[in-house]
């Protein structure tokens, strides 16, 4: 069974929690990108193959991020990760960014996204085979990244026995002229220069960094956008929210809600596009600052309660 939830749905968090709590057996929960030109999430890979091969064993909940301003206010997968792993931010982050496998509502495994549907499918089937005998293990020979052993490298050229700096010679009949470069050396330099100027490499070289990305796949975190700009100066979270460090948690929460409401999409809908972008950046800044402040104030309150008891 497959179901799709959308970030733009105001009740997406509650719907996700209800699916997790109400599904018996194995359940896959993950996030996907979605746009008007894309197929429906459940028709894409690796989800379609999982449903075809293991739909009688595995249920799926796909949480689709349409990339709209309505959805940017919500992080249902992050909320689910925090709920399942309250004591570990690393585990919560992994669960919200990878493929989360649960059984009867309890987390059992997290499979990291490798970037292509074929790779992700192999690792998902491997994880499922460990959780239930009804899913066979994938072929180890087809494991992504599996390569046959390469032949050992050739021995390096023996250095000159004299220990002195070796000069290059060119043959001139029966004599050698020191300092002149051989034809083979000049040809090698020419090939290297041509390769540098055209950006090509020798056909014998292996480009191990090349990877074919699927246009509809959801790549791992960090591969969706170009390399980031140099980091700007980090702003103090308390300053961003206009709060002092001794502000009570309830008052801080009210101030945060009042501040972020000013940048709601409905407030800037009548403005030019550049103001929409500014509002989105400001919103992210406020949300990040509130996360820091809320954790700090919640921790302080817990310590005070323990000290007073």
Image (cartoon, rainbow, N blue to C red):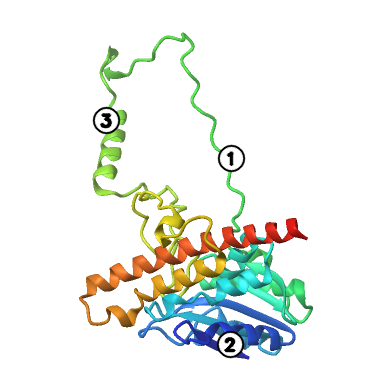
Q: Position of residue 291 (x, y in %)?
A: 52, 63
Q: Position of residue 22 (x, y in %)?
A: 70, 88
Q: Name the residue rendered at 52%, 61% in the picture.
A: 247
- Mark 3 is surrounded, within 10 Å at the Cα level, by few (under 14), some (14 to 19) or many (20 or more) other residues, namely few
Q: What's the CA distance linking mark 1 and mark 3? A: 28 Å
Residue underneath mark 3: 186
- Mark 1 is surrounded, within 10 Å at the Cα level, by few (under 14), some (14 to 19) or many (20 or more) other residues, namely few
Q: Foreground mark, 2 or 1?
A: 2
Q: Name the residue rendered at 49%, 64% in the picture.
A: 290
Q: Which mark, by number, is residue 110?
A: none
Q: Earlier in the sequence, mark 2 or mark 1?
A: 2
Question: Are circles 2 and 1 on residues that touch, CB within 8 Å?
Answer: no
Q: Which mark, by number, is residue 15?
A: 2
Quadrant (top left/top right/bottom left/bottom right) for the C terminus: bottom right
User: Looking at the picture, does residue 66 appear above or below residue 194?
Assistant: below
Quadrant (top left/top right/bottom left/bottom right) for the N terminus: bottom right
Q: Earlier in the sequence, mark 1 or mark 3?
A: 1
Q: What's the CA distance linking mark 2 and mark 3? A: 69 Å
Residue underneath mark 1: 152
């Amino acid at each position: 069974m497959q179901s799709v939830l959308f970030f733009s749905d105001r009740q997406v968090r509650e719907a996700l929690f209800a699916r997790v709590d109400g599904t018996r057996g194995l359940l896959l929960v993950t996030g996907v990108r979605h746009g008007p030109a894309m197929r429906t999430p459940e028709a894409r890979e690796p989800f379609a193959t999982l449903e075809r091969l293991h739909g009688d064993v595995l249920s799926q909940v796909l949480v689709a991020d349409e990339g709209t301003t309505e959805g940017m206010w919500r992080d249902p997968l992050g909320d689910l990760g925090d709920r399942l792993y309250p004591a570990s931010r690393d585990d919560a982050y992994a669960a919200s960014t990878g493929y989360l496998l649960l059984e009867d509502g309890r987390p059992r495994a997290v499979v990291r996204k490798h970037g292509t549907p074929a790779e992700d499918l192999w690792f998902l089937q491997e994880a499922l085979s460990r959780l239930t005998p009804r899913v066979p293990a994938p072929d180890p020979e087809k494991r992504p990244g599996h390569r046959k052993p390469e032949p050992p490298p050739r021995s390096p050229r023996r250095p000159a026995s004299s220990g002195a700096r070796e000069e290059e010679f060119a043959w001139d009949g029966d004599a050698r002229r020191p300092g002149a470069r051989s034809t083979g050396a000049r040809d090698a330099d020419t090939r290297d220069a041509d390769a540098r100027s055209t950006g090509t490499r020798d056909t014998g070289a292996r480009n191990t960094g090349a990877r074919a990305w699927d246009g509809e796949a959801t790549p791992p975190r960090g591969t969706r956008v170009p390399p980031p700009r140099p980091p700007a100066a980090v702003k103090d979270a308390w300053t961003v929210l206009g709060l002092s460090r001794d502000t009570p948690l309830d008052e801080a929460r009210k101030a945060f809600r009042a501040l972020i409401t000013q940048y709601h999409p409905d407030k800037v809908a009548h403005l030019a596009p550049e103001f929409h972008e500014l509002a989105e950046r400001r919103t992210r800044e406020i949300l990040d600052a509130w996360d820091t402040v809320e954790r700090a104030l919640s921790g302080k309150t817990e310590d005070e309660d323990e000290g007073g008891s």
